[in-house]
């Protein structure tokens, strides 16, 4: 994810740096974009979607689910407290109204050569830790090395293309990359959370901890009660409070995270006034749960806010590590048992759209048949791909919504027979012709609310002779089982950005399939997908990125890794009427960190008194 500046900007900002053999054109500036030009020029005052004069002050209470037992958010052990990212600054920050652009924060200047083979960050001399000590190049180098060596496995994968990190000049850090095209890598390094070496070198970074750590961000931990509450306080002398990327942001003096057993309990607590802001993810609850006196009086506000986010994919994810799901015909057949049209009408109040792309709601989504450059790219792999990739546009099965899914179940039954499964006439169970194994599996859930979606799917599968058990577990057990890939089917999702890149290796890469904690939930190992991911990462411009993403999307769809769910192209927001908010809404939707407490409105607000129990 990189972006070249305009010709004029290059003329002003590029420098020729001697490499010992030939001059190398180097861009030097205040920010970097994946493709195209930066929206915000050098010297900009603030992002368009904030109120630069937003008042500071007030308190806001948010909700967490389950519990927490650690303040170390960088390792795989433990369950970190929600909101920990507030206490750390990164080298750069992204804007919410561009596909993928980043602007210096802890760094003051970024340098990259034309071929993106390295990146250098020159630190902002004003950057300070909460104890007053300056942020140094040693902190940056130590942070990178420690996250790579001791952090969650994700970091070793994410930063795996870095060959060397070293100090340059008085206040610069240079990352040199391994051979190969990876134009996103400079921006990925810009996302690096920088940690204080002088604090952590006296502590065990690989261990969980409930000692509030030292940070450099807009907030610090004020107090906490394990598994129940974390209170963050705004740092009054925050070093970057007037920085253009931070102006108008982080306006609350106190942010309180209160934990609840599950979403149902939390939703009721919100309606009772226990906390202030709620993003609803259930169509049923949105349609039925908020018709209460507080909403009618205007004390509680509910809004549907459009966004232009790439929707990604959510669905029932098959664990291909299980022999049961090795055959793509089996995986495809099970999609015919999911009656989305009935579910949407009966369960979701017709609010959703069926997802038929891993990059839905964006230009990155594949459609029709491959043509032009996408076809040329896929031709390299023709003999390793299903013929349907070239001959048939992917579509999900469709029903009339009546609940009578007989036609699709007949199609599914035929596919299962072709894959070697038949219904035993005595037991009425679907059985493998060769092994005699009964077709049965478990759907693992962490939210009880999903049971109402799984159970009709289970009933349809039972008509095919398939035994399905549904198991809902607590968040700690769920996290552990998913990290260890200890599941048959799970409700999983892959959020996607407008500019996909290195994270796709973690989603689909063969190397990630056996790495505990990776996001390759399906366990996909496919050299074609690996090759397409690398092509995507190396894309030199936006057009090339879109082409490579279309090809990757198309191949993933024909792998039948999931039974696709659905999406909605808006945020469903509920909040108690005590906030002010900017007039401009960016393409990524609601930016709660740019809101503020409107004291005049808050004084008039009459909330119900929250119950003393229920957490």
Image (cartoon, rainbow, N blue to C red):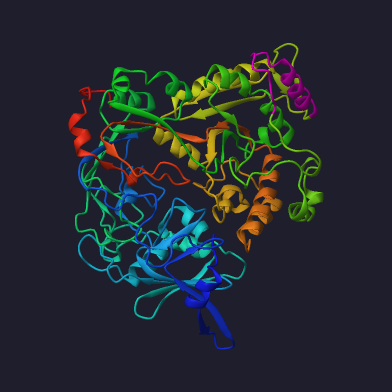
Where is residue 103 drawn, in percent x and y? 42, 62
Image-based side of 593 in relation to 391, left or right: left
* Rendered residue at 33%/18% (across/down): 292
Looking at this view, name the residue that lies furthest to the bottom.
20
Residue toward you, 425 or 330: 330
* Rendered residue at 33%/52% (across/down): 207
Q: Is residue 408 magenta?
A: yes
Residues in magenta, as a range: 397-418
Whether residue 433 is visible, yes or no, is no
Where is residue 52 drawn, in percent x and y? 30, 53
Looking at this view, name the residue that lies furthest to the top.
426
Q: Please identify the quarter of the rendering in which residue 269 is found.
A: top left
Image-based side of 302 in relation to 222, left or right: right
Residue toward you, 267 or 345: 345
Quadrant for the N terminus in the image? bottom right
Q: Is residue 565 above or below residue 162?
A: above
Where is residue 413 drawn, in percent x and y? 75, 22
Q: Does the magenta stretch include residue 415?
A: yes
Quadrant for the C terminus in the image? top left
Where is residue 472 drawn, in percent x and y? 46, 26
Whether residue 606 is visible, yes or no, is yes
Q: In this view, does 300 lie above or below 226?
A: above
Looking at this view, name the residue that lies furthest to the left.
603
Image-based side of 466 in relation to 60, left or right: right
């Amino acid at each position: 994810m990189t972006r070249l500046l305009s010709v004029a900007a290059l003329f002003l900002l590029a420098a020729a740096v001697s490499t010992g053999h030939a001059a190398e054109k180097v861009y030097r500036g205040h920010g970097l974009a994946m493709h195209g030009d930066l929206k915000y020029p050098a010297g900009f005052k603030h992002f368009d979607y904030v109120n630069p004069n937003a008042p500071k002050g007030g308190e806001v209470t948010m909700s967490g689910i389950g519990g927490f037992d650690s303040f170390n958010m960088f390792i795989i052990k433990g369950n970190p407290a929600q909101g920990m990212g507030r206490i750390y600054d990164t080298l750069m920050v992204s804007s919410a109204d561009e596909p993928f652009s980043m602007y210096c924060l802890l760094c003051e200047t970024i340098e990259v050569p034309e071929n993106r083979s390295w990146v250098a960050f020159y630190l902002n001399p004003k950057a300070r830790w909460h104890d007053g000590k300056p942020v140094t190049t040693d902190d940056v180098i130590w942070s990178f090395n420690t996250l790579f060596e001791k952090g969650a496995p994700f970091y070793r994968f994410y930063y795996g293309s870095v060959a060397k990190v070293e100090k340059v000049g008085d206040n610069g850090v240079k990352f040199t990359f391994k051979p190969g095209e990876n134009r996103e890598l400079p921006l990925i390094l810009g996302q690096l959370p920088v940690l204080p070496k002088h604090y952590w070198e006296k502590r065990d970074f690989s261990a969980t901890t409930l000692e509030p750590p030292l940070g450099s961000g807009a907030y610090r931990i004020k107090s906490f009660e394990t598994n129940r509450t974390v209170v963050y306080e705004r740092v009054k002398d925050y070093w970057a409070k007037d920085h253009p990327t931070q102006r108008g942001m982080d306006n609350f003096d106190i942010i309180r995270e209160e934990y609840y057993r599950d979403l149902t309990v939390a939703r009721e607590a919100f309606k009772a006034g226990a906390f202030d802001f709620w993003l609803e993810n259930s169509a049923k609850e949105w349609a039925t749960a908020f018709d209460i006196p507080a909403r009618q009086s205007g004390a509680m506000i509910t809004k549907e806010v459009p966004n232009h986010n790439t929707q990604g994919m959510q669905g029932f994810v098959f664990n291909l590590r299980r022999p049961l799901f090795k055959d793509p015909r089996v995986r495809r057949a099970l999609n015919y048992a999911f009656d989305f049209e009935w579910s949407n009408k009966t369960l979701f109040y017709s609010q959703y759209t069926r997802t038929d792309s891993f990059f839905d709601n964006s230009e990155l989504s594949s459609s029709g048949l491959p043509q032009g450059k996408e076809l040329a790219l896929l031709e390299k792999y023709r003999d390793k791909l299903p013929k349907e990739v070239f001959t048939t546009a992917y579509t999900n099965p469709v029903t009339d919504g009546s609940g009578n899914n007989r036609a699709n179940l007949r199609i599914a039954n035929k596919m299962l027979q072709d894959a070697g499964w038949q219904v035993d006439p005595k037991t009425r169970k679907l059985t493998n012709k060769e092994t005699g194994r009964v077709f049965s599996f478990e759907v693992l859930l962490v939210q009880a609310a999903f049971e109402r979606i799984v159970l009709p799917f289970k009933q349809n599968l039972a008509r095919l002779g398939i035994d399905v058990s549904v198991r809902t577990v607590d968040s700690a057990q769920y996290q552990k089982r998913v990290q260890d890939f200890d599941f048959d089917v799970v409700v999983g999702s892959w959020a996607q950005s407008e500019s996909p890149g290195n994270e796709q290796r973690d989603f689909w890469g063969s190397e990630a399939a056996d790495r505990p904690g990776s996001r390759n939930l399906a366990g996909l190992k496919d050299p074609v997908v690996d090759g397409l991911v690398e092509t995507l990462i190396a894309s030199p411009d936006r057009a090339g990125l879109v082409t490579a993403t279309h090809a990757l999307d198309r191949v993933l769809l024909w792998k039948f890794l999931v039974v696709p769910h659905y999406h909605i192209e808006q945020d469903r927001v509920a909040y108690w009427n005590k906030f002010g908010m900017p007039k401009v809404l960016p393409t990524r939707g609601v930016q709660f960190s740019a809101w503020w407490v409107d004291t005049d409105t808050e004084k008039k607000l009459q909330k119900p008194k929250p119950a003393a129990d229920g957490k």
